Amino acid sequence: MESSRTPTRVQPKLGDPALTEKVWNRLRHNGTLVRDEVTSHLPPMLRSLTWQEFQQMPMARWACSLMLLLEPPPPPDLYRRRIRRPESAGPFDDIPSLTQRAGAEKIYAELCERHADRLLSCLWLLPILAGRARDLTLRPEAHGSERGRRMRRIKGGKHAQRRYREQGWHPLASVRKAWGLTGDRPQT
């Protein structure tokens, strides 16, 4: 006797490949979802039933599991995510240094205070502020005034190079020679 709580999907038998619903939904053949290849030519009301029947066929299950085995593995750094932390854990519990953790919590509190008027309507802002506090704490050298000065020097240098090209002149004789220019500075 089957109860009303029995799942409608077919349970795998011993020796059958384990194909979960998630695997079935991402399985591709030549770049197209297998589900679309099987059901695309059918009317919409028959697609669901046909897909369920296809999933129950032993030959289809073995073919799809073989496709999974032959599928190249994804590149190692593609979509690399941090391990999800438990709900009860704080946003900075994984920072090993207590002083850095305290610093991150202080910066996080300051950021939350600065954006207090938007926090109730923008719940997505809290994790962003936590990530910003973490970044400011763990990599302070990337956020100081020295970095700003360095970036402005780089930007100024690029601007000067562009201006030299537009004027057709450069202060370095080697560059003038490479560009085929004379030693005379054009009058602007």
Image (tube, rainbow, N blue to C red):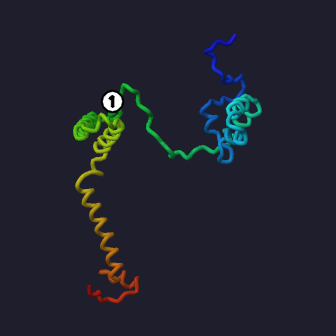
Q: For the point 44% across and 38% down, which residue is it?
A: 82
Q: Position of residue 129 (x, y in %)?
A: 31, 40
Q: For the point 30% across and 73% down, which residue is it?
A: 160
Q: Quadrant of the N terminus?
A: top right
Q: Is residue 42 visible?
A: yes
Q: For the point 32% across and 76% down, which residue is it?
A: 163
Q: Is residue 87 above or below residue 146?
A: above
Q: Is residue 99 visible?
A: no
Q: Position of residue 66 (x, y in %)?
A: 71, 38
As shown in the figure, which amino acid type bears the numbered disc 1? Gly
Q: Please state if 35 lies on the left or on the right of 107 as rendered.
A: right
Q: Is residue 165 above or below residue 115?
A: below
- Quadrant in which residue 169 is drawn: bottom left
Q: Quadrant of the C terminus?
A: bottom left
Q: For the point 55% across and 47% down, which residue is it?
A: 75
Q: Position of residue 49 (x, y in %)?
A: 70, 30
Element assignment for label 1: loop
Neighbor class of circle 1 (other Cα within 10 Å; few <14, some 14-19, many 20+) is: few
- Quadrant in which residue 157 is drawn: bottom left
Pointer 1 residue = 90
